[in-house]
Image (cartoon, rainbow, N blue to C red):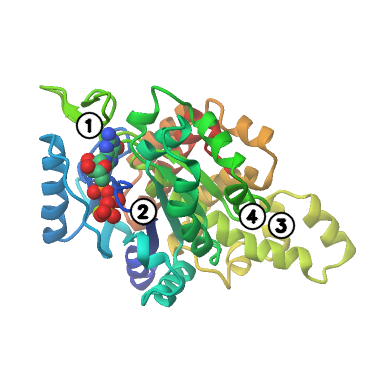
Amino acid sequence: MRSISSEKLASTYTYKILVLGPTNAGKTTLLASMFYKLGLLNPEVGSTLLTTSGENQNTLYARYRSMARGEWLPGTNEVSEWKFSYNVWSPYNLEKYSVMQFSYLDYAGGRLMEPQSVGYQELLWRIQQADVLLVLLDGEKLLHVMQGRLESENFFDIDLRNILSCVFQGKAPTHFVVTKWDILKPFYSLGDLKTFLLENDMFRWHIKGQKRIIRLIPVSAFGDEFAKRLPDGTMVRIPGKQPQPYYVEMPLACVLIDQFTHQLQQPIQKFKEGRNSPLLSFLGRRGTLKTIIMLGGGISRFFQTVQIHPLLMAGTITVNMVLDFVELYGKNEDRRRKRASNKTKRLLRIREKYLRSVKNQQTATDYAIICCMALVQKLEEDFPDSFLT
Ligand SMILES: Nc1nc2c(ncn2[C@@H]2O[C@H](COP(=O)(O)OP(=O)(O)OP(=O)(O)O)[C@@H](O)[C@H]2O)c(=O)[nH]1
Ligand SMILES: [Mg+2]
């Protein structure tokens, strides 16, 4: 039986997310719409609930409500930290289990990113501590740049230069989140955007050769039906329509999977570099992740020195599934595209089955992991171009 202390440890295990982006990129709006979507039961994401303090909840709902009324609010322009608890709710025994925490640090862009600014050293420290870095790119601005209405140097040199040079001082998985996708989508696909970004030397040099996971995630806090964009660029609400945010939950869903994959890389590297017998080295070079872990002494021994959610490793069936799921990260694009084919339905069936067995924190964590896998799978299926590395 699992001890109480390890269950407590699991519920307080915190994933640190650092959000960076120029002013007006949509950082606060993303947070408000993500909370709106994940803070209530929603079959799209599974039987999970994101909760936070009463004060945070009021602030985020107020932000979301003004957005839904069609009030385009001014930026917040400050550094703010938000703490969330991720819970699983069982409709079978009517219990709620807290399985992990997320700390979401919204770091305004601009001057803070400049090496001479007062907070620069602290920012670098936070980048190194983060489990995942979210870099928000303003979708509307990108549209203007891609249409040649704004000099691309403005975007790359002013918005991105400082962010890229900070972000790549750390090693954490990095998600480029393209906000306001509702504005970009009628004109360009994610593939067009990926090609456009990679044509820029500075962007390509930063991305190429990186071992970390780098994703490109399109999100919309409004959805496609809520507002109309007039030719002069202003947004007007379409009467009677409500916002239908889409993909706003994906950055959070990717955190757990990408942090696990990232943590796996260290012991794998160590094993490959270790002075193993020729037979072990041979098997390690050619084997699957599971073979390497087995050769490295089993799961708990293999992960001794890295930071992983304690109950993620303990659920033997789920750890097996997660290993299969992340197996293809290091592989070439064709194989990853193959993974992104038609598996969401299967994962959703497994998710339903697991929900029935949720009865303690271990089973709740297993269920939460499957929910995240199903969402990541959906993202990759809908957008095979969302891999940047
Ligand atoms: N059409 C559309 N507009 C959006 C979306 N997300 C944000 N916006 C608009 O973009 C503007 C800026 O959003 P904010 O969330 O305040 O941006 P921010 O990055 O927090 O800005 P600062 O706090 O100044 O750093 C607001 O007027 C939002 O309504 C979206 O998904 N679609
Ligand atoms: Mg803001």
- Which residue matches tag 1? 234
- Which residue matches tag 3? 292
Q: Seen from this angle, which residue lies furthest right?
A: 278
Looking at the image, which residue is at 60% across and 54% down?
A: 206
* Position of residue 174 measured from the top left corner of the image (x, y, whole percent): 50, 53
The amino acid pointed to by label 4 is Gln
- Which residue matches tag 2? 22
* Position of residue 274 measured from the top left corner of the image (x, y, whole percent): 78, 70
> Whole-Å distance between the Cαs marked 4 and 2?
23 Å
**Which circle's residue, 1 or 3, is located before the other in the chain?**
1
| Residues under numbered marks 4 and 2 in contact, where contact means CB atoms less than 8 Å apart | no
The amino acid pointed to by label 1 is Thr
Question: Does any atom of ligand 1 lie closer than 8 Å to the CB of label 4?
Answer: no
**Which circle's residue, 2 or 3, is located before the other in the chain?**
2
Q: Nearer the viewer, mark 2 or mark 3?
A: 2
* Position of residue 317 measured from the top left corner of the image (x, y, whole percent): 52, 48
Residue 282, quarter of the rendered image = bottom right
Asked whether residue 1 appears in the rendered view, the answer is no
Task: Classify mark 3: helix, strand or loop.
Answer: helix
- Which residue matches tag 4? 210
Q: Nearer the viewer, mark 4 or mark 2?
A: 2
Looking at the image, which residue is at 47% across and 33% down?
A: 146
Q: Nearer the viewer, residue 205 or 321?
A: 205
